[in-house]
Image (spheres, grey):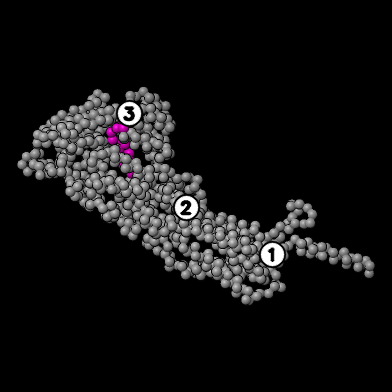
Amino acid sequence: MDSYSSDETTGELPPQSTMQVELKTFPDTRATCSWSSVVSLVLASCAVGLFTAWTILATALLPHILKPAQGIEFQQVASRIPVPHLLSWNLETINRLIALRDMNGSFRVIIAIFVFAFLWLLFSKVLNPDYHPLRLHMPRKGGLLEGAFETDNPLRTFLAVVFTMLAFVVVYFIMRPSQTHLSSVFLYPQHDTVVWLFRFAAWGTILWLCLTPAGLIDVLIHPEKTVNILRSVLFALMGVLWGLLAFVPYRLFVPTSLDVLLLRLQQLGPFNMHLYHAVTVHYLELITGVWTAAMFWAIVLAPRSTLIQRIAATSGALVCIGLCGLNSTWFSPYHIMSRYDISVQSTNAVLFPYNPNHPVSGVPDGVPAAKLLAEKLHINFMESASSPPHSLLVFRSHGQPVSLLLHGYTVDGLNASTQATRATAKFLQRKKYRSALAWPAVEHLFDCYTLRFDTTAALNVIMEDLTQGPFASQCNPAALTMFFTCAASRSNRELLDEWADSRRFTHPDRFSRRLIGDLYRRFGQKQKALYWYRLANMPPSFMAARIQEKPMFHRGGASGTILLNGKPLVGARVGVMPWRMNGLPVSLAFELHNAIGEIYAVRPSSPIFGPFQPGPFALRWLSEGTKTDDAGTFHFDDLTEGQYRLLVELPASVHLTIPLDPHLTVLGGVAPFVVSYAHPLHQCGMIKLMLHGAGTLH
């Protein structure tokens, strides 16, 4: 009996000792929510919000940045040409977006399950501090390494997680919102409001019925506990309240679809770094704020939260909602319409819907866009008294001119008066080239200057556009042509310095660096040309030839006097157009040789310009323009080595028959002339224009 009693006593002691340890180690059943659980839930919600936002952004943004091709090719970024900084994308950032977009489907599911389970654990600790899904059990003696992780009934805990997850999924798929109507210009359609409201209310109900004390999880793990119906109804109502509090900022602030927004922003031109930062920063802060506010409301409504925790969580939720409200103003229809001039009318003026395969698509263009700009800036359409048509004389190889008609409006029919030019320039500066009407405005401003033979001002429009709102596919070819054919004046050299400025443009390949070297060589800037050739790693033989050669001739001049019916032609525009030039690429030399056909416009490409009525864009081939003085004299400087034609614009009061007017007689006509080191200055002499009969002044 004694031995039996001894054995019985010995066998009963360990369980009694273990129970004493557990009672001292485990918290009381009325434990309050710990600050560590609160902070962990808030930080986890921030991280999940950021990850969710980046995943959505990766899917939405990349079709507007990359070309639909294998590898990484950026839209409107051409090789061999300097790249505007706004289109110089960070390759590491793009690779991260690609990794998020192309994430394997099964891997996405694994991450979603892991994130859901992690948030579920944190949520459960906030709603029910008595529940211990995962804790570190420490023995009486020993260090941290001797501890062990424990959980309340692992199998039933796992089943509870799975049940909650399935309940969320079922609610999501049962309540399906309708598809976003992409033709709407507004970003917050309300057709799915009721669906999302029921979703949030159902999710809140599931969480509070499952995770609160004496809820489904407690009953599963501790079957001896009973369910209090009245208390469950109260918790269900609190879950519905949480769903409503979480739903309101989501519905008020989060755009229904980024696709709608990005399609509208495509009206501003190529998706660039400015738009990328604006969209990502505001969207990341918005989504993160909505997630964090929802978790703050969970802390406020948790049954065991302390008063201080509720006050702090309420303050945090209100701050998050306030920040969401501030960020959401960037996505609001009013902001998009007022800041970027995007409207139903501008959307209807998009001639070609956006297609990443076609760089010029998605932008308001043509006559519809020009009419919107004319209405906004109060510009006359077609010709007016302030900008009448002029006759243009182009001197041919035998010295006799062809008579052309130069209209006083641009390619889209906008009036090209000085007042209209000034209004458009102010509009672009005020908008910083960020407007749905930016491209029609750039076209209008460029054409206004070419019609005035002001090559420098037209080239400056292109450089400003490439710097502030790059329509690269449209402006790069024009910039390339004009830099190779313009006069080597000081103003043009300063514009070339801008194209070479690494603070405004990047030069990613040796071809783009050689291009800058070739242009400096053409401008006679030998040392700058050699510097860029070295950056391009040109071969030693090439460098030796460039070092030994004489700077290209760039001080050519031409002068003459024009008389009309024996009197000086005062204030007339005179221009020179190259025919052949030294230092051109082979392809451009061929284009230049045939450019006179574009000036003659025998077969016009626009319905508002007839035969022998050149469009303003054709005048980009002029190297330089000037005006005659009171004596009818004109003078050109800084012409580079080449052969040039002379163009003279007559006063609006002179009306000539095109292309050859029998009433016009020209004495002393100017044939194409050459300027070079051997012939630095060409004297055009006295050019006498005689009008008689029907060709007299009107």
Q: Secondary structure at mark 2?
A: helix
Q: Is residue 646 visible?
A: yes
Region in magenta: 475-490
Q: Residue at x 76, y 53 (%)?
A: 146
Left or right for 130, reference 380:
right
Q: Are marks 1 and 3 in contact (CB under 8 Å)?
A: no
* Chain-order first, disc 1 or disc 3: 1
Provide the residue designation for mark 2: 280
Of 424 and 399, nearer the camera is: 424
Instruction: Tell me where residue 265 appears, x and y as whole percent.
Output: 39, 54
Quarter location, residue 43:
bottom right
How busy is the neighbourhood of tag 1: few (under 14 within 10 Å), some, or many (20 plus)?
Answer: some
Residue 355 appears anywhere in the view? no
Q: Is residue 626 left or right of residue 532?
A: left
Amino acid type at circle 3 is Gly
**Which residue has dot 1 on it?**
31
Q: Amino acid at mark 1?
A: Ala
Q: Amino acid at mark 2?
A: Thr
Secondary structure of residue under mark 1? loop
Quadrant in which the N terminus is drawn: bottom right
Question: How many neighbours does mark 3 have within 10 angstroms: few (below 14), some (14-19), or many (20 or more)?
Answer: some
